[in-house]
Image (tube, rainbow, N blue to C red):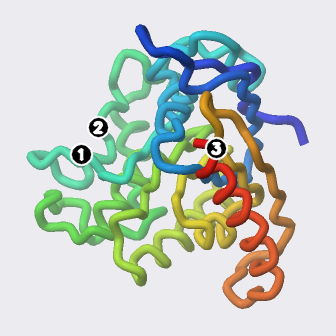
């Protein structure tokens, strides 16, 4: 399967820095697949995500979406961080639709925007909360709203920076199942940054390890196991040990 989103020889260097943050990095994301990205703290995972989202221009290399070079932000790339970043003065419904009428978004009629928002809210199970404000939402509901805001853009590429990191264990598990469902139905090419090896193994079709200084990919593991995986302890356990050993080695080099 060809990549629907790719980066080649990607380099990112900040002005005045002695060396680049990222150097010579290649990455492919495919429609309907989740790729998890692990790496030591401070290695450059969030910098990579911002660059892939078009928020930062790379110092070298090229990013392509659907075969077309990426130049800045793109309406079919959606990005979510650990903080849902909901605007407190807007209802959940208006937060989900926020930005759909911005200049870089496709021109939509008011009816089309409303339909997208309603569809996204339904996809994450929040119809009952559409008129609530962020202060009235639980952590899990706020995370669902942030995911709905991404879905309303009909993304080809979904970039997630530890979106479930601040949630309790039960809510996190619910959000993980929701993400699997969303990717299976809507089929965005998805990159999930996480510090949790178990989360990566439960969700991802492929696990990448970012390491070194400057950072590059130092590990790549396909996870060819069916969903759900919660009971595949032996199969996941062997892979977990291998990834953990590689992560520890990356920490020593970082």
What residue is shown with label 2?
A: 98
Please provide percent x and percent y for residue 148: 41, 53
**Residue hosting label 1:** 94
| Upstream in sequence: badge 1 or badge 3 | 1
Marks 2 and 1: CB-CB under 8 Å? yes
Q: Secondary structure at mark 2?
A: loop
Q: Is residue 97 left or right of residue 35?
A: left
Q: Which mark is residue 253?
A: 3
Query: What residue sits 75% from the left and 43% below the top?
Result: 218
> What percent of the width, then of the height, locates residue 1?
90, 42
Placement of the C terminus among the 4 image quadrants: top right
| Secondary structure of the residue carrying numbered label 3 | helix
Whole-percent x, y for residue 240 in the image: 72, 72
Q: Residues within 10 Å of mark 3 (few under 14, many from 20)?
A: few
Residue at the spot x=53%, y=25% of the render? 51
Compare residues 98 and 4 and report the one nearer the observer: 4
Structural distance between the alpha carbons of marks 2 and 1 = 6 Å
Left-right relation of 247 to 155:
right
Task: Classify 129 as above or below 42.
Answer: below
Q: Could you classify mark 2 by the number of other residues whose Cα lies within 10 Å: few (under 14), some (14-19), or many (20 or more)?
A: some
Left or right: 164 as drawn, with respect to 90 = right
Residue 223 higher or lower than 83, as above or below: below
Task: Place residue 5 in its image quadrant.
Answer: top right
Q: Earlier in the sequence, mark 3 or mark 2?
A: 2
Label 1 SS = helix
Q: What residue is rendered at 66% in x and 49% in y?
A: 250
Q: Is residue 206 left or right of residue 183?
A: right
Q: Which one is in front in this view, the residue at disc 3 or the one at disc 2?
A: 3
Cα separation, mark 3 vs mark 2, equals: 42 Å
Residue 175 in percent (x, y) is at 47, 70
């Amino acid at each position: 399967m060809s990549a629907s989103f790719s980066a080649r020889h990607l380099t990112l260097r900040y002005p005045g820095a002695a060396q680049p943050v990222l150097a010579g990095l290649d990455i492919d994301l495919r429609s309907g697949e989740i790729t998890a990205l692990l790496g030591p703290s401070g290695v450059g995972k969030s910098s990579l995500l911002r660059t892939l989202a078009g928020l930062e221009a790379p110092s070298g290399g090229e990013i392509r979406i659907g075969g077309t070079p990426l130049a800045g932000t793109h309406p079919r790339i959606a990005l979510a961080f650990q903080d849902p970043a909901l605007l407190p003065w807007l209802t959940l419904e208006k937060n989900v639709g926020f930005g759909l009428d911005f200049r870089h978004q496709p021109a939509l009629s008011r009816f089309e925007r409303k339909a997208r928002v309603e569809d996204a809210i339904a996809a994450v199970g929040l119809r009952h909360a559409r008129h609530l404000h962020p202060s009235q939402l639980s952590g899990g509901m706020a995370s669902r709203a942030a995911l709905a805001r991404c879905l309303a853009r009909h993304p080809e590429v979904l970039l997630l920076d530890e979106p479930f990191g601040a949630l309790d264990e039960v809510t996190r598990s619910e959000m993980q199942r929701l993400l699997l469902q969303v990717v299976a139905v809507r089929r965005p090419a998805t990159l999930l940054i996480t510090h949790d090896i178990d989360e990566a193994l439960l969700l991802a079709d492929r696990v990448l390890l970012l390491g070194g200084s400057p950072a590059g990919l130092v590990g790549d593991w396909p996870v060819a196991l069916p969903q759900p995986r919660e009971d595949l302890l032996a199969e996941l356990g062997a892979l977990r040990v291998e990834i953990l050993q590689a992560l520890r080695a990356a920490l020593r080099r970082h």
